[in-house]
Image: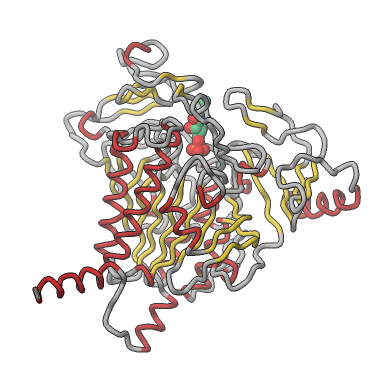
Amino acid sequence: MHTRILSLALAACLAWACSSPKSEQEQASASSKPNIVIIYLDDLGYGDMSAYGASQLSTPHMDRLANEGIRFTSGYATSATCTPSRYALLTGVYPWRNKDAKILPGTAPLLIDTAQMTVPKMLKAQGYHTGIVGKWHLGLGDGETDWNASISPGPNQVGFDYSYILAATQDRVPTVYIHNDRVDKLDPADPIQVDYQKNFEGEPTGKDNPELTTMKWHHGHNNSIVNGIPRIGYMKGGKAALWNDTTMADHFLAKAQAFVKENREKPFFLYYALQQPHVPRTPNPRFVGKSGLGPRGDVILEADWAIGEFMKTLEEEGILENTLVIFSSDNGPVLNDGYYDDAVEKNGSHTPAGPLRGGKYSLLEAGTRVPFMVYWKGTVQPQVSDALVCQVDFLSSLAALTGSSIQGQDSENILDAFLGKSQTGRESLILEATGRTALRKGDWVMIPPHKGAPVLQAVNIETGNLPEYQLYHLAEDLSQAKNLAGDQPEKLEEMVRFYEGIVGN
Ligand code: NG6
Ligand code: CA
């Protein structure tokens, strides 16, 4: 009886971060050096969470971060695609300053200069143990990578003590996990070869061997076939190391949990970059059919579950109240991104972009405005914040939090907005989509004339490209229905001048 009560008390204690009283000194150091976790989704749209208004999908674990933390309504990735957003998140530099910061093939060299400041480097200098689990997509090696030897430079050369990653995207080769600088589970007798230009003699492809595929390609995605899924790029060998698509969420979750458990005694930084709901959407059988919206909805529920399990680990380890959790997504949503996976057919009345116009690849709001939450139990007060915040601000803001004086080139210290002490974030932000830029300033957005199609037909998304200026007043017109460029010449002029002062002309 006694033992049972004791063990119940112990369990409750473990679950709810109960610990022995801390000395004043311990408390002070705990508050300035909390653990920091960035949970980063891939292509999750502004309207893909119930806390952001989705009624067809229920995302209770993500919602908990939103409802018990700060839910930002104007939180942005810098970019409408993955690589540039991730570059800005880690370096505090606008990606359009780097001509190579665009969607990278799996064989691209490391995009971040190893001499460059990064969030993990800065935190390491402040005494943090740093780790990344999940999607990288910032290039690896020097461009001549031998996937059978040390793959370097990579995350471990730009500030991460520990890395367990997928190199590029789930739809790109190599389809293997990389643990620090080595392909995990690689059999040296079966070396891996990767090429983005030409196929390897005799290897089947999605284009020539549709009978070998279980998921059909719609556009692109017709090179090497792995696990029945045709991918971008060619690959041969490495059979024992190939990942299992349907256990990827479990696999990354287990690595993220292990990292937390191993480092619970020290301040740690974990960048947990989930692969959902990017294509190919491969929910574990446990989630198949759960959303009623097809695989895209199912993998969002899978990600939600994984986040719930991860948060449970922070609770069970007794460190929830000493962990700042930031949640966001690298770009806006897309339904058909290259496979026939029923994303369009089963979407029903779900609105992945919420009230916003555009989507992934777009300069319109849905390209870059994403779910964005900050959760810190006991420290951050639950609230909704309209402050303009961006992932590029993590470097300077987290530096301020942890006592570092480092400032990123384009990264603003808006720590008070991130902690909910102020409703004022940035004054302005340059948005980027596939190399084109626009300005958000105050409640206004100005998109300069851009060449290129106004609609990407394959994915059915408006790009924001028009031959004339666009000016939108978001406070009154969140869905960017009315171009005020003609009606408001003075406002337009002010915005253009400000934009050219930053980007040039
Ligand atoms: C595009 C792919 C798309 C996706 C995207 C990168 C084609 C036709 N389309 O080129 O499927 O992989 O790149 O997405 O290949 S991101 O979220 O990583 O930026
Ligand atoms: Ca993405």
Point 64% across, 39% down: residue:
435
Q: Is residue 79 left or right of residue 263?
A: right
Q: Nearer the viewer, residue 250 or 429?
A: 250
Q: Position of residue 377 (x, y in %)?
A: 43, 69
Q: Picture quarter containing residue 421?
A: bottom right
Q: How is the image coloured?
A: secondary structure
Q: Nearer the viewer, residue 80 or 232?
A: 80
Q: Is residue 240 left or right of residue 26?
A: left
Query: Measured along the vertical axis of the image, is residue 392 above or below residue 14?
Result: above
* Residue 362 appears in the figure: yes
Q: Picture quarter containing residue 385?
A: bottom right
Q: Quadrant of the C terminus?
A: top right
Q: Nearer the viewer, residue 314 or 127?
A: 314
Q: Is residue 92 left or right of residue 342?
A: right
Point 43% across, 30% down: residue:
294
Point 59% across, 41% down: residue:
353
Q: Position of residue 169 (x, y in %)?
A: 42, 37
Q: Quadrant of the N terminus?
A: bottom left
Residue at the front extreme?
Answer: 1
Q: Position of residue 127 (x, y in %)?
A: 37, 72
Q: Nearer the viewer, residue 95 or 311?
A: 311
Q: Picture quarter containing residue 14?
A: bottom left
Query: Measured along the vertical axis of the image, is residue 401 above or below residue 426?
Result: below
Query: Measured along the vertical axis of the image, is residue 389 above or below residue 181?
Result: below
Query: Measured along the vertical axis of the image, is residue 68 above or below residue 296?
Result: below
Total numbered labels placed on residues in the image: 0
Q: Position of residue 333 (x, y in %)?
A: 55, 38
Q: Is residue 433 left or right of residue 115?
A: right
* Residue 174 appears in the figure: no
